[in-house]
Image (cartoon, grey):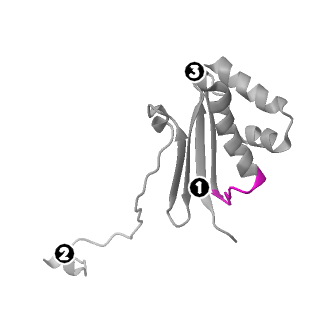
Amino acid sequence: MGYRSDVAYVIKFDDIETRDNFVTLMLAKNEPPITQAINECEHGYKDDPIITFKQESVKWYRDFEDVKAHHALMRDAVEIYGKKGGKYRFISVGEDGAEECDEDDDDGDLWDYITTTHAVNTSFPTIPTGESTSTLDQE
């Protein structure tokens, strides 16, 4: 079965043209894992120069080729286009609730795109008023 995680990242550039140039450059590498990774991302935003990726319940091990390719996209965005705003934020939440965060975002701009939340959600059946058996209700 293996350990599974929910993962997401956002890569942001200064403008749409730079983002599109980055996508073209990554595809031009003609490296199957990189091509697959960029094709798994969303990069068609018309008004926001971002690339996004999200998967749930995935085996996200650093030594897997596809995972290496996604991390290479984030690293390359900073190394190649850092002067044109290339930055990223990555978050992984494991099935045990453990979080991993990696980012190159000095001003916190990418927190508006990706954060984590922890919550308890319930769908208890409704108990008619006055019939609760909880001792907390009797205090």
Of the numbered discs 3 and 1, the one sitting upstream in the chain is 1
Alpha carbons under labels 1 and 2: distance apart:
38 Å
Name which residue lies at 68% across and 34% down. 76
Give the structural element (helix, strand or loop) at label 2. Answer: helix
Q: Which residue is mark 1?
A: 6
Which percent across, then down, holds residue 108?
44, 34
Of the numbered discs 1 and 2, the one sitting upstream in the chain is 1
Q: Which residue is mark 2?
A: 137
Alpha carbons under labels 3 and 1: distance apart:
28 Å
Of the numbered discs 2 and 3, the one sitting upstream in the chain is 3
What's the residue type where badge 3 is placed? Asp
What's the residue type where badge 2 is placed? Asp
Alpha carbons under labels 2 and 3: distance apart:
56 Å
Q: Quadrant of residue 31?
A: top right
Instruction: Please name the predominant secondary structure of the magenta segment in the image.
Output: loop
> The N terminus is located in which quarter?
bottom right
Q: Which residue is mark 3?
A: 14
What's the residue type where badge 1 is placed? Asp
Q: Which mark is residue 34?
A: none
